[in-house]
Amino acid sequence: MKTKVYIAAALAGALLFAVGHLTATGGGMSRKTQENLSTAMHGEAFAHAKYLLYAKQAQRNGNAELASLFTKAANTERLQHFAEEAQLAGLVGNDADNLKDAIKGESYEVDTMYREFAEQAAAAGDKAAADRFEEVRHDEMAHRDAFKTALAKVETKPSAGR
Ligand SMILES: [Fe+2]
Ligand SMILES: [Fe+2]
């Protein structure tokens, strides 16, 4: 009886192992690790931007030492942590790939994210946020369109974008 349980457990383990491998990419990285890399990169990018604002605030208060601490940490978040994780994740492709990815992101912000955020803020009576979301949405349209123009240029040059 016990042997049966062991065999069942071993089979379940082997199955989980196989499924884990099936979800891995060509680079041999599991889906979970890829997701974690994406989460980590978002955190590092946010910390970078936030620390620069904190540095500005410290500078305003005349605390140059604290400003320098925040600036140094901000640089590490972006130039080391984000950059190294981006390398592992294979974030950067050729110019055409990068433009397509950028267009996808900007389009999502224009058509879905900022549109909904503006609507929701307006419905909640948060007028300043609603106005800001709508203004940013228009900026993202300009980004999307500039990237589309750049992509068309890259794609007409046969050797470009690599
Ligand atoms: Fe970091
Ligand atoms: Fe943008």
Image (tube, rainbow, N blue to C red):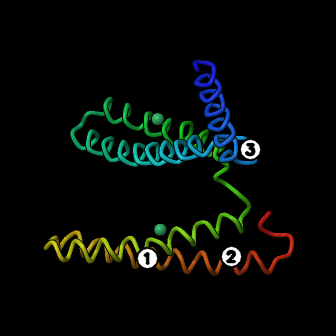
- Residue 133 spot, x, y in % from top left: 31, 72
Which corner quadrant holds the N terminus? top right
- Residue 44 spot, x, y in % from top left: 46, 42
Pointers 1 and 3 in contact (CB under 8 A)?
no
Cα distance between the residues tagged 1 and 3:
32 Å
Say which of 19 and 161 sits in front: 19
- Mark 3 C-beta to ligand 1 under 8 Å: no
First in sequence: mark 3 or mark 2? 3
* Residue type indicated by callout 3: Gly
**Residue name at image x 68 percent, y 76 percent:** 151
Residue indicated by mark 2 = 151
Residue indicated by mark 3 = 27
Cα distance between the residues tagged 1 and 2:
18 Å
**Residue name at image x 54 percent, y 47 percent:** 35
Residue indicated by mark 1 = 110
- Mark 2 C-beta to ligand 2 under 8 Å: no
* Residue type indicated by callout 2: Leu
